Amino acid sequence: MVEIATKVDIILRLSFFSSILPVTIEQKQPPTKSVKMHVVYKDIEGDMAKKLEDLFGLASGGLIEVNPGKVLIPPKFKSYAQRIIDMEVRPDDVWLVSYPRTGSTWTQEMVWLIGNDLDFQGAKMLQQLRAPVLELTALLGNDTSGVIKLIGETVEIVESMPSPRFIKTHLPLELLPKQLDVVKPKIVYVCRNPKDMCVSYYHYCRLMHDLHGSFNDFCELFINDMVPMGPIWNHIMGFWNRRNDPNVLFLRYEELKKDLKSVVLRCAKFLNKELNEEEVQAVLHHLSFESMKNNPAVNLEPVLEYRKTALLNQMTEDKVTCMQAPSFIRKGVTGDWANHMNPEIAARFDEWIKTNLEGTGLNFQV
Ligand code: A3P
């Protein structure tokens, strides 16, 4: 039976970790030759940009467009973009890449646990500390709650982590380290039916990014590639096109939902680990929706509580949308779009999905 650490325990570990990390870990590798790539930043303009800023309560310039990839992200990312592209990749790194709300926390938990020989004790530490989201400091660039103080400089944290590193990112392939192609560490990519992603992202943006528009407004942004992080298709195809590379494991949320056991076994094989039946059952128990929902190491509760308290103290109406939003690990089902999308929006999504999947061989039916 997996023991769950208390929230206070996790907050303490969180602050402890960020305060000691830069001085205690000295495994930084010597700098390697970097391949220069031109990152281009652009202001976002037009009606859609205005709508995006309004719905998220952002001042003009609160998000910029970063190319290649057309990523929409707070301008703070400028301090990290080139550094990430030039970052040293280690052969024993394990990268988890995904667009937000595809089940990446779930998949990361599976990958981390199997990669760490089922270290359930170690898994009590906040997942963000065990497997940091590389660009998180930039993603939270518009956050006024101060939660970033708890999380720290994520690029620096990743650079300083001891090996083997487990790293998560929502960036598209074009903005990831060039060395990924040379060093070829293990990369797990996870995607999800865009209709369910959109629903899940809407609730997440209310919870974490002060989104206060309607679901229909959010769908309009999503289908026009104008949500934070930008377009989904380029993101997915970057890795779908590499799905047969031996260092890539390409997964779909729907596969995890349908048959988690076989995904666990595939993941173990990919990571060169062997699991007996008892171990598989322990992993499945740890990864069940109920366990994940109640596990403060992955359900973001410690961070959300901190954020809510800080925002409540600021007491502006827009800033308390998170109070009404459902939890981070929300419903965990496929097909929830049907409870949110009207027939007209669903039909537009179907057409959009069909157009973008045509000829690719990818689908979300399992
Ligand atoms: P819903 O909002 O549809 O419930 P990410 O971690 O990439 O942000 O993805 C979050 C989505 O994964 C949420 O989807 C969340 O509920 C779902 N999820 C997390 N853990 C899960 C689990 N054990 N089983 C099923 N879904 C899970």
Image (cartoon, grey):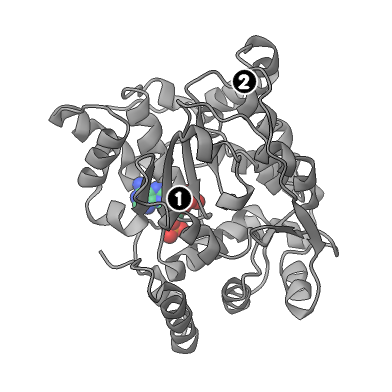
Q: Reply above or below: 215 against 273.
A: below
Screen quadrant of the N terminus:
top left
In the drawing, does residue 223 fall left or right of residue 211?
A: left
Disc 2 C-beta below 8 A from ligand 1: no
Q: Is residue 120 visible?
A: yes
Viewer-side label of 2, 1: 2
Q: Residue furthest right?
A: 60
Tag 2: Cα neighbours inside 10 Å, few (<14), some, or many (≥20)? some
- From the top left corner, tell me how far across and down residue 167 is, in percent: 52, 34
Q: Residue furthest left?
A: 277
Q: Reply above or below: 70 against 109.
A: below
Nearer to the camera, 324 or 260: 260
Disc 1 C-beta below 8 A from ligand 1: yes
Going 75% across and 62% down the picture, which residue do you hit?
Answer: 318
Tag 1: Cα neighbours inside 10 Å, few (<14), some, or many (≥20)? many
The first of marks 2 and 1 along the sequence is 2
List the residue tagged with mark 2: 17
Q: Is residue 328 visible?
A: no
Nearer to the camera, 89 or 226: 89
- From the top left corner, tell me how far across and down residue 10 is, in percent: 54, 26
SS at badge 2: helix
Q: Amino acid at mark 2?
A: Phe
Q: Reply above or below: 344 against 112.
A: below
Q: Amino acid at mark 1?
A: Ile
List the residue tagged with mark 1: 329
Going 73% across and 33% down the picture, which residue do you hit?
Answer: 149
Going 44% across and 76% down the picture, which residue do you hit?
Answer: 353
Nearer to the camera, 205 or 256: 256
SS at badge 1: loop
- From the top left corner, tell me how far across and down residue 20 is, in percent: 67, 15
